Amino acid sequence: MDHAFSRSTHDRAAHLRTDDQWRSAPGPLRILVIGGEHVATTETGGVAWIVEADLAGHQVPEGEWIFLGYLGDVRHAALVIDRVPAELRPTSLRMIGPEIDRDDASLAVHAVGITRWHERHRFCPSCGAASVPAQAGHVRVCAECGTHQFPRTDPAVIMLITDDQDRALLGRQPSWPEGRFSTLAGFVEPGEALEDAVRREVMEEVGVRVGEVRHAGSQPWPFPQSLMVGYFGSADHADDGAQIRVDQDEIAEARWFTRDEVTEMTSSAELLLPPNVSISRALIQSWHGGTIHGRWA
Ligand SMILES: [Zn+2]
């Protein structure tokens, strides 16, 4: 499956993260200015890389540095500030994710993931004192007790389940408008294998029993700190196991869709599916195999 953020192409060069070693490492340096999930972009909507000498000209304030690594012999770093100046066209990575080139996506998703982690982990989990960044932005160290905190990623499973007629199971969340559907998804619980999380979430949300599951790919989703792990799964039809019983809490409506229904209903906008940036769309597209129209905004 090919989808946004599906491949990491840069060399993270973690051996250079100690202190400021990356600063004096060889190679030209390109800088991405970033604030939250917003990155500086070019006039044509790509990721804007700035050389250090030009930072002052763009009136970029002091910030925290994250060393991202190398692409070829070029060093790449992110400069994290509260708000990217308007002249640098701050744009959410979520919006440009499917459009930008693979190398820029690889670096930007790394930068946004680390940035969001810093924003949300300013205090030590052991003693509650303030922590400070270290190792070129990839660790936080408690100023009181010295505890090291490493970037968090929360695994979530996202799955396209099919029945014995190869129809796809899609659901609508209660807050979504009529006609908007997606694959089911949920967070993995402590002590749980990914495959079991797929089966549990589908059973909880729509009452369908899932048998075989197979890995379909994964997608870092740093909004703020998830890793979406995609699966295809087959409903277990024994004893009415494929009968939909919606829980009404996380899912308001769910049904089995044929490929023809997806083609026709997306064409008439009766059915709205997720945008191209999502692994959900990639799962649906991979199952469908043909042309799917439209998406939700
Ligand atoms: Zn501490």
Image (cartoon, helix red, strand yellow):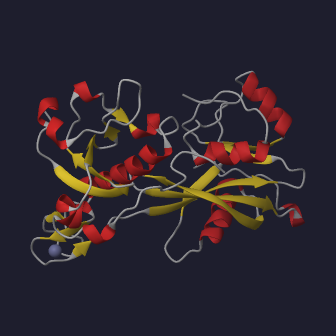
189 vs 21, left or right, is: right
Q: Is residue 223 visible?
A: no
The residue at the far top in this view is 268
Q: Is residue 205 visible?
A: yes
Whereabouts is ligand 1, in terms of quadrant? bottom left
The number of numbered discs placed on residues in the rendered structure image is 0
12 vs 272, left or right, is: left
As displayed, is residue 159 above or below residue 236? above
111 vs 243, left or right, is: left
Q: Report the residue at 80% width, 60% height from top.
A: 235
Percent from the top left, x then y, of residue 200? 65, 65
As displayed, is residue 127 above or below residue 252? below
Q: Nearer the viewer, residue 263 or 240?
A: 263
Q: Report the residue at 70% width, 23% height from top.
A: 269
Percent from the top left, x then y, of residue 289? 79, 42
Q: Report the residue at 40% width, 61% height from top.
A: 11
As displayed, is residue 292 above or below residue 107? above
Q: Nearer the viewer, residue 5 or 130?
A: 5
Q: Nearer the viewer, residue 87 or 172?
A: 87
Q: Report the residue at 19% width, 41% height from top.
A: 82
Percent from the top left, x then y, of residue 18? 21, 70
